[in-house]
Amino acid sequence: MVVAVALAAGPVEAQSTPLRWGGDSEGGAPYIEADPQDPSRVQGFDVDIAELIAKELGRPAEFIQTAYASLDQSAARGDFDIALNGLEDTPARRATLAVTVPYYEFSEVLTVRAEDAQRFRSLEDLRGHRVATLGGTTAYELLLAAAREHGVVPISYDDDVHPYEDLLHARVDAVLLDNVIAERSMRRMPGLATQPEAIAVGHYVGILGPAQRQLRDRIDVILRAAMADGRLEAILRRWLVWNDRQPKLYERLAQGTYRAAPEVGESAGVVDSDSTGASRPSGQAMAWQYLPSLLSAAVTTLVLSCLSMAIAVGLGAVIATARVYGNRVLRALFTAYVEVIRGTPILLQLFVIYYGLASVVRLPAFIAALLGLGLNYAAYESEIYRGALLAVPRGQLEAARVLGLSNWQTLRLVRAPQAFRFALAPTTNDFVAMLKDSSLVSVLTVMELTKQTQIFATNLGSWVIPGALCAAMYLAMSLPLAQVARRLEARWSAPESL
């Protein structure tokens, strides 16, 4: 068998040429995780499979850390030779990449809180309830279909850990994800129950760039040999993910009857590694299908940004005024606030507000995002307004004092109006920046424009059309504001007629 594999694989590469394979260790075990004994190394069943492939190719394995959402694009770019990370066999991947034979069959399963196990047995039982999953996956497409048919509310996440945490905290009512992820979460989080019936069945594959079909064919030979001689089974058993589905998958592959995953709502067909899968709509047709979702997400982005900016402007003005006119204690407190907020990442602040405070107060995702953006930008706005207040000529302040105006009257009638003119341009710039930074709130399950675009691009298999639409929508939101700001600046800076 080894001889046959070697002959099929062709000449052995030099030992100095590593097999570069991509994955995201943030996803954790049993796929890929940092080795607790040596954090510079990774472990997991995808790690072991990559090393098995590299060994048979006569090359050392080299892991390339890549964000999960970018694996398809990185494979197409040639950033690595192959990606292995629990990647689903989908029509989009088969249409744009070289896809290996599947090496694992999983089921999409529904996980609920233990007390709801009898109440929520299927998606039909979850009408009007929030169901979480990973964005850009088959499970997400299933939820979109269930939203149309059964009225469920799909909630998209960027990782596979927080959906189950939010399920425990009753922020969502169920999670639809792979049985591998569900079983891992069940072991880590007591109080959850997974329904035994599979909602759908899928397969994990390796993906390579479209020009790497020759290497893909060699890897297919290696994987088939590992299935036949038990090496792949040994790896899966070691990571406690072996089940009765795998022998049936291996048998279908040996008989040539493996059925590639169809698009949601389409029938499957028998395919081989060179097939492009089920027929797919064109990029233009899919753009029209996703346009309503993109427009809805753009509205969410705009509303969130406007409300957050209102909080930032109001709070920033209070902080700036207190730091200019307040006593020593007040100035110290607000200075500390500004420095802490500016010195820590906004993503960390969002996680603390939404997840860190969950044991005290369970804020809705939109409210947490609103507070996170507003409180963060308030620190920056306060510095703009403080600088603008200090920029008002001292002679005018002394004149106001000579006229008998109080500090409040001086601020309201003399200092603030002029400071507002000074602060207008940088405040406008900050609002445009907030429009873009709002993309970060997708980690809190808020479906804003960039997140919806990412899902569109994943399902289409290309960023060209989704990226162009997303950029056009951001420009449509930001350019009018910039134009209004320029007109106001020109009007207020014009010399008064005599």
Image: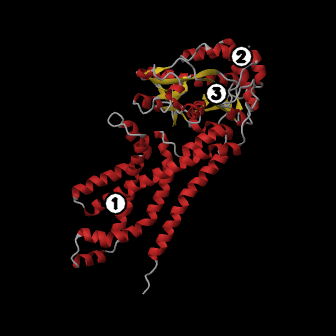
Q: Where is residue 125 in the image (x, y as percent from the top left)?
A: 50, 25
State the SS at label 1: helix
State left or right for residue 207 relative to residue 3: left
> Circle 3 — which element?
loop
Location of the C terminus by quadrant is bottom left
Q: Nearer the viewer, residue 64 or 372?
A: 372
| Residue 19 position in % (x across, y down) | 66, 30
Secondary structure, mark 2, is helix
The mark nearer the N terminus, 2 or 1, is 2
Q: Which callout, 2 or 3, points to the residue nearer the camera?
A: 2
Residue 99 drawn at (x, y percent): 70, 30
Disc nearer the start of the sequence (2/3)? 3
Query: In the displayed structure, does residue 53 sit left or right of residue 417?
Result: right
- For marks 3 and 1 on the same chain, the one whose residue lies earlier in the sequence: 3
Quarter residue 45 falls in: top right
Around disc 2, counting alpha carbons within 10 Å, would you say few (fewer than 14), some (14 to 19), or many (20 or more)?
A: few
Q: Which residue is labeled 2 in the image?
A: 252
Q: Residue at x 49, y 73 (%)?
A: 490
Q: Tag on residue 317?
A: 1
Q: How far apart are marks 2 and 1 (CA)?
A: 67 Å
Please tell me the numbered disc located at residue 60. 3
Name the residue located 57 percent from the left edge and 20 percent from the top edge.
198
Q: In this view, does 20 lie to the left or right of 373?
A: right
